[in-house]
Image (cartoon, grey):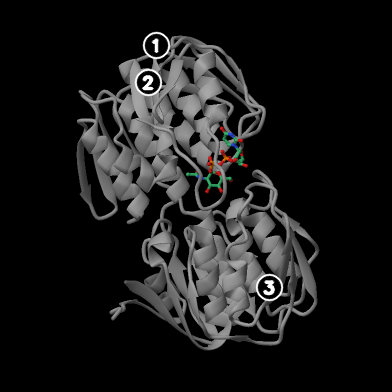
Amino acid sequence: MSVFRIQGGQRLSGSVAVQGAKNSVLPILAATVLARGECVLRNCPPLTDVEYTLDILRHMGCGVKREGGTVWVDASVPTDCVIPDELMREMRSSVIFLGPVLGRMGRAELTYPGGCELGPRPIDLHLAALRTLGAEIEERNGRLICQGELTGGSITLSLASVGATENAMLAAVAAKGTTTITNAAREPEIVELQEFLRTLGADVRGAGSSVIVIEGGKPLHGGEHTIRPDRIVAATYLSAVACAGGEGELLGVDWRQLSTVTAALVEAGCQVESGSDSIHIAVQEPLGAVRPLRTAPYPGFPTDAQAVVMAALCKAQGATVFVENMFESRYRHVDEISRMGADIRVEGRVAVVCGVPRLFGARVQATDLRGGAALVVAGLGAEGETVVSGTRHIRRGYGDLAGDLRALGAKIWLEEEIVI
Ligand code: UD1
């Protein structure tokens, strides 16, 4: 069993380049299914979720090669439209394959993704969008069987879901005619997906706004793309410096995508300076509490940054209120951070963090990706040794968390621990 071992309570100092974004690379890899030529993706982060996605592509009969951060996918002749249960279980976001596989092959089969560590994660909006484009979808013994020749249509999402927007875009690119997606999610990852689809020759407009228009049905060719830096990983490293104190520079990040996170950290007393593709943070004084932080779709405060920013504010003087509006079970890190001396009370979707003067190192268990990263952030600001188990959750989204934090001056190692 591997653990992160942290010697906390030391100020940080250093700089680190931020990895490519998990939430960009996954839909872009799914999009390669639509291309009748080779796609080359650079700056792919070394994540287990990326490996599972490549396994799905291999299973479908695509040629897949990976060398360092570069991945080649050749979907000239996909042969299998069935995604096996074991790959679906490894990664719930594999539902993103539904749209492109159906669009390319006229049929897609996968297991119904059930609940996950963030609470129930329905896919009703994904299915409704595909039905609007003419898909016939049947559920048989927990399997989803989707078929039909897709044609353009008018999709209105009742909620601006990131995954449903991406699935709808990927299906619409293959559907003949015009598709309009109204109330589309506006996350930067959607804009990046549009950019990649255009590289393949697709006609997609409007990503980044709430209406996306797609002229679909043209065969797509191969193309190249470099995955953009991960704004949530950047938020994690900013939170790490905020919690431990000191200073740090993040390279290759777009500060505009992080403005709600940096605004909160500045309000807490951090000094943040943004360059054209870098952010510098310095923390000299103890932090103070901030006004309520409410998670919301982009450009609001990201739900994925809630846990790490909460960890950073555990020692801030005063009380900070968090309101989690996106997912039901997103406070699972709270009990574990409390073992380190934090004072956090949760009621429903609200968490109140009352700042304590010190956190103490402890053995804690990660139960989800961002909550696990929050335990590491808290460990950096805690006195003594913290050991974080459940690292497999964290490694779904951070390619080399320990290495990156060491570059920022932290004492943290990923170790194998022998359980007797
Ligand atoms: C994506 C991100 C995830 C992030 C989330 C919200 C990826 C791979 N994951 O997840 O890191 O936390 O956006 O920013 O990009 N919903 C429905 N029905 C649906 C789909 C969603 O009710 O069919 C609800 C969800 O339960 C949730 C809300 O919509 O309450 C937002 O979810 P969504 O935007 O779809 O998140 P994901 O795409 O799963």
Residue 205 visible in the shown view: yes
Looking at the image, tell me whether mark 1 or mark 3 is earlier in sequence order: 1
User: For numbered disc 1, what is the local secondary structure?
Assistant: loop
Specify the quarter for ligand 1.
top right
**In the rendered structure, are the residues bearing label 3 and label 2 in contact, judged by CB atoms less than 8 Å apart?**
no
The disc placed on residue 97 is: none
N-terminal label among 2 and 1: 2
User: Mark 3 or mark 2, which is nearer to you?
Assistant: 2
Residue beneath the point at 76% across and 76% down: 288
The kind of residue tagged 3 is Leu
Residues under numbered marks 2 and 1 in contact, where contact means CB atoms less than 8 Å apart: yes
190 sits to left or right of 315: left
> Whole-Å distance between the Cαs marked 2 and 1?
8 Å
153 up-or-down from 295: above or below: above
Identify the residue at image location x=24%, y=31%. Answer: 60
- Which residue matches tag 3? 313
Q: Is residue 277 visible?
A: no
- Rendered image: mark on residue 148: 1
Q: Which residue is mark 2?
A: 102
Camera-side residue: 143 or 288? 143
Residue that sits furthest to the front in the current view: 141
